[in-house]
Amino acid sequence: MTLPVALYSAPDGVEKNFIPTPDDPRYLTTEGRTTGPSDHVLNAGQIDRDKPSDPKYTADGSQLTYLSQLRTQLTGLQDDINEFLTRRMELAKNKKKAGAEEKRIQEEINQLLDGGDGEEDAD
Amino acid sequence: MVNLNTIPPKNNRDFYIAIGLEGSANKLGVGIVKHPLLPKHANSDLSYDCGAEMLSNIRDTYMTPPGEGFLPRDTARHHRNWCVRLIKQAMAEAGIKDPTLDVDVICFTRGPGMGAPLHSVVIAARTCSLLWDVPLVGVNHCIGHIEMGREITKAQNPVVLYVSGGNTQVIAYSEKRYRIFGETLDIAIGNCLDRFARTLKIPNEPSPGYNIEQLAKKAPHKDSLVELPYTVKGMDLSMSGILASVDLLAKDLFKCNKKNKILFDKKTGEQKVTVEDLCYSLQENLFAMLVEITERAMAHVNSNQVLIVGGVGCNVRLQEMMAQMCKDRANGQIHATDNRFCIDNGVMIAQAGLLEYRMGGIVKDFSETIVTQKFRTDEVYAAWRD
Amino acid sequence: MTSKREMSLDYTLELQIPFETEGQASIATKVLSPDPILKPQDFQVDYSSEKNIMLVRFRSIDDRVLRVGVSSVIDSIKTIVETIDELS
């Protein structure tokens, strides 16, 4: 069967193709890693009884229906996209933090060079 | 007089079948209703007497741990993951083999309620409609409660008290609309009770309100009510002040704050008030306010009948207090349904939706199926009533 | 200085969903299309179908908004797929 796919592109030039690998267990389950209950309720002790339904088998039981396969592949694809974008967001956040930290250190150095004693001036 | 048979059943049958899908809060309900085609409905005002048969009424409630409320995102996930299974189960129970031939209309809650959960359900509704080539009707959740209440109790023209986790309204029918005579100015009464239950950290199963009711029954000091703010404002009422008050008392109780003279004797430091007493006083206070604004509406429209709908309507103490007031008013009476119907369910959506369908009110374009968090009861044109 | 509103939505994702039939792809497109976007200046989605393939084009102001929007639409698509699978 044809697979569901995604193509991502960002202004910093990054491009990524998302293509499921049909035999990989990540694409054979309806229970996504990134689509569980929210952390808040899990931390409050929630037991998840609302997982998605299992994929469906054909009438003779020999294999999953086309649409069930599509659903499991979409589940894996969704996880891939979510995890990729989350990593990018983390990287961007760390760069920003690192940038802010660098700026602070540079300002301290400048102050010392200018003859301050490292503490804020009274005026 | 109206003609409830304006739209005939499909395929020359002598009955209608409607599927109802409800998901505005944490209950997901799928119901299937059958109406016989009766000559008496062709020119009359009998929408409270449809001869409705419930072919299926399935509900699954999204439960959270004690102390936690339900968040839109997780509630939507619950509805998304269960709706197809519930629809399948309901259809099997109702014996529907071929929906294209057998189902006249698919009814769904368009609002009011929580956006994401409502949306989860409407996706399934739209898909079924296109798959089976069956028309859709969007239903107002409150109207669903009202029409179910009317059909079950056969109340002729009552003032309706609609009390739930999300709504608190006093409603009376007049000229094709359900008019809101009084309502909450801030939070719903069910929300007030649910939040107090979270403060007390009591279980959410089977429902926080039910558990508060059971605690209240066991209150040891019913003769000395804890004084709470009484906040009726004309035809309306407010409840956030009462919640703040009772939350503070509960917290002082847990901390054993002996300085609180309401809770602890000022000389001996002995505890005078228990958690059960707080539940009891909260109920008595809130329900007395509801009785007052309901009675005010009854006086306005000259009615001595009350129909209580919505989840909080299951509360026996509320029914008692309301019944007493009605009896004192020209020997009136209250009508209420049991928890199959006063708690959110799919059958009520099917009932209200089917009435609207029979009068010709179907969705002509999918833009009419956009769900909405706010949807006033009086926005709906009740074509099925005289 | 460019105001936020004038910034282009240049974080994009294109999703291709192969259904079994043209009819299914068309149904999915019709089911997803009606709902309005809360903040169109931050996020846009276009749905279309070609034969049995549904195409969804997302454009967003950043990765965060893109992730939320894409995941939400895929959730809806999974519901549509399950409905067709179980209730046809």
Image (spheres, coloured by chain):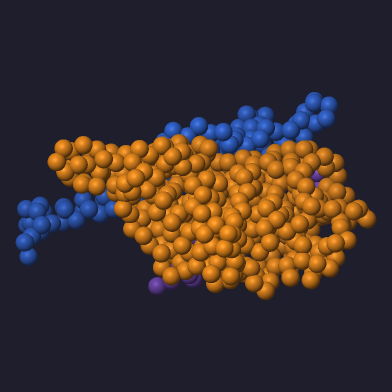
Chain colours: A blue, B orange, C purple
Quadrant of the rendered image containing residue B126: bottom right
- Give percent across and percent down for residue B23: 61, 50
When the figure is inspected, residue B218 is found, relative to residue B290, above or below; the finding is: above
In the rendering, at what x and y percent does residue B300 appear? 54, 72
Looking at the rendered structure, the number of numbered marks drawn on it comes to: 0
Q: Position of residue A11 (x, y in %)?
A: 50, 57
For residue B380, side relative to residue C3 (left or right): right
Between residue B382 and residue B276, name the one nearer to us.
B276
- Tell which of B119 and A110 is nearer to you: B119
User: Residue, x 7% and y 65% (percent of image)?
Assistant: A123
Q: Residue at x 79, y 58 (%)?
A: B135
Q: Is residue A39 above or below residue B241?
A: above
Q: Quadrant of the C terminus of chain B?
A: bottom right
Measured from the top left, where is residue B244 in percent x and y? 33, 53
Residue B371, by quadrant, is: bottom right
Q: Is residue C23 left or right of residue B340?
A: right
In the displayed structure, would residue B341 be above or below residue B2?
above
Q: Residue at x 52, y 45 (%)?
A: B316
Task: Tell me which residue sits at (16%, 43%) in the image.
Answer: B266
Q: Is residue B127 visible?
A: no
Instruction: Evaluate whether residue B381 shows in this view.
Output: yes
| Depth check, front residue: C68 or B219 | B219
In the picture, the quarter occupied by the N terminus of chain B is bottom right
Residue reaching furthest to the right: B12
